[in-house]
Image (cartoon, helix red, strand yellow):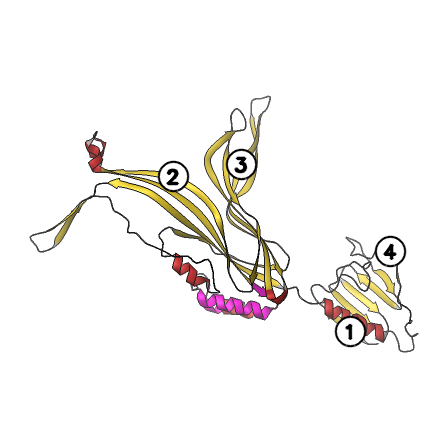
């Protein structure tokens, strides 16, 4: 008897017919003795000891059995094993099918960068003076007002991005109104949704009622507040990656709405979008346009003197500023078909990242990378 053993995380869901709907974790194919009857020339038929299609039982014990032509198939739900007893020719056919189906599904490593850019337009009004003088010991001292004016800086931004995302970040970092919110990475299987949440869970009162005894009972639910990104990658031909992207940005506003006579609920300000993009493996796409308006007024003054009517304007400074905040989302997908590609991407990321010895030693990191093989 010739035995062929194939083991894997996911072997096959069906053999020859859709009626055999089962998830296989290990499979053994055995050929009957050589003096057994030859296989029939007619197409094989399927019969089962179950009235319904053979499926992985839940909480059941024992074997489930079925036949395909001269092949006898036994499934053990406790060990997740599929045992097939058949002739040599059918053995080869099943072995070929198993090898075709038993392939790891490709994965996509998505690198995400959240940038917040603030465009400002303000009015800065006030008086500022400075006087330098020399002292008797030869040093120079300075007399000036307390109002310090920030130096102006400039930055640049390109719509067309190459593979080197760092160049774009450095070019944009020249502006004083740029903030890197987060830079996560997520690994997901092909056609599987991945979710990235950067924020916090905030309790909200959804309902409030007063009992007959006068007690107040509030119904509280927790909701994610911050940046939530849902992305589903689909690998197409030539390693192109189609991504369904749904970003959402939520913040707590200063407004409230009454939900009962004694309770006011906070209002959530949300910005959301949904789009489909197609990008080459390793290239970067940018999603923008999620904007928010803000208005601020700041007054700086010298105590007492700044409060003098009319004359106080000479001792204070008023800054009125209107800002428009835009969230930019950079997405860089990397197709990962095997552990070697994942190792190469991890090594490339390690070369660009400085690891603190207090958090993760280089030896520990190298050991982790080696385990990816």
- Going from N to C along the chain, the mark reached first, 1 or 4, is 1
Segment tinted magenta in the rendering = 334-363
Question: Front-most of 219 and 93?
Answer: 93
State left or right for residue 250 relative to residue 17. left
* Disc 4 and disc 3 in contact, CB within 8 angstroms: no
State left or right for residue 326 relative to residue 371. left
Tell me if residue 314 comes above or below residue 339 in the rendering. Answer: above
- Going from N to C along the chain, the mark reached first, 2 or 1, is 1
Task: Please give the name of the residue rendered at 69% of the width and 67% of the height, measured from the top-left corner.
Answer: 103
State left or right for residue 296 relative to residue 146. right
Disc 4/disc 3 C-alpha distance (Å): 51 Å
Disc 2/disc 4 C-alpha distance (Å): 71 Å
Task: Please give the name of the residue rendered at 38% of the width and 39% of the height, measured from the top-left corner.
Answer: 295
For mark 4, what is the residue?
50
* Disc 2 and disc 4 in contact, CB within 8 angstroms: no
Tell me if residue 271 comes above or below residue 184 in the rendering. Answer: above
Dot 4 falls on a residue whose secondary structure is loop
Residue 4: mark in rendering = 1
- Going from N to C along the chain, the mark reached first, 3 or 2, is 3
- Which of the two discs, 3 and 2, sits closer to the camera? 2
Residue 204: mark in rendering = 3
Q: Position of residue 39 (x, y in %)?
A: 90, 73
Dot 2 falls on a residue whose secondary structure is strand
Disc 1/disc 3 C-alpha distance (Å): 59 Å
Q: Position of residue 233 (x, y in %)?
A: 60, 58
Location of residue 220 (image quadrant):
top right
- Going from N to C along the chain, the mark reached first, 2 or 4, is 4
Task: Identify the image quadrant of the N terminus.
Answer: bottom right
Task: Please give the name of the residue rendered at 41% of the width and 52% of the height, measured from the top-left corner.
Answer: 179
- Going from N to C along the chain, the mark reached first, 4 or 3, is 4
């Amino acid at each position: 008897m010739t035995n062929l053993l194939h083991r894997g995380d996911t072997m096959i869901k069906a053999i020859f017919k859709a009626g055999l709907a089962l998830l296989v974790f290990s499979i053994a194919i055995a050929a009957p003795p050589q003096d057994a009857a030859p296989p029939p020339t007619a197409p094989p038929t399927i019969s089962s000891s179950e009235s319904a299609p053979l499926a992985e039982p839940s909480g059941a014990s024992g074997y489930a059995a079925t036949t395909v032509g001269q092949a006898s198939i036994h499934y053990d739900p406790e060990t997740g094993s599929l045992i097939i007893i058949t002739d040599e020719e059918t053995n080869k056919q099943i072995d070929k099918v198993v090898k075709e189906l038993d392939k790891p599904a490709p994965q996509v490593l998505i690198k995400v960068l959240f940038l917040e850019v603030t465009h400002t337009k303000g009015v800065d009004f006030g008086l500022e003076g400075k006087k330098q003088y020399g002292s008797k010991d030869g040093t120079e001292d300075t007399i000036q007002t307390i109002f310090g004016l920030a130096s102006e800086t400039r930055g640049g931004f390109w719509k067309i991005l190459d593979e080197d995302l760092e160049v774009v970040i450095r070019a944009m970092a020249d502006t004083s109104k740029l903030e890197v919110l987060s830079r996560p990475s997520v690994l997901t299987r092909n056609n599987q949704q991945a979710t990235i949440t950067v924020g916090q869970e905030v309790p909200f009162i959804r309902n409030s009622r007063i009992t007959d005894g006068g007690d107040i009972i509030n119904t509280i639910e927790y909701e994610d507040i911050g940046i939530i990104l849902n992305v589903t990658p689909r690998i197409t031909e030539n390693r192109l990656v189609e991504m369904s992207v749904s970003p959402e940005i939520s913040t707590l506003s200063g407004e409230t709405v009454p939900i009962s006579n004694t309770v006011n609920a906070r209002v959530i300000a949300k910005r959301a979008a949904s789009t489909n993009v197609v990008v080459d493996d390793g290239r970067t796409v940018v999603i923008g346009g999620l904007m928010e308006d803000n208005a601020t007024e700041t007054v700086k003054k010298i105590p007492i003197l700044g409060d003098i009517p009319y004359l106080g304007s000479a001792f204070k400074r008023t800054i009125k500023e209107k800002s428009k905040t835009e969230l930019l989302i950079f997405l860089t997908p990397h197709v990962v078909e095997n552990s070697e590609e994942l190792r190469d991407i991890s090594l490339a990321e390690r070369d660009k990242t400085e690891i603190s010895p207090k958090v993760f030693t280089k030896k520990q990191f190298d050991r982790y990378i080696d385990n990816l093989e």
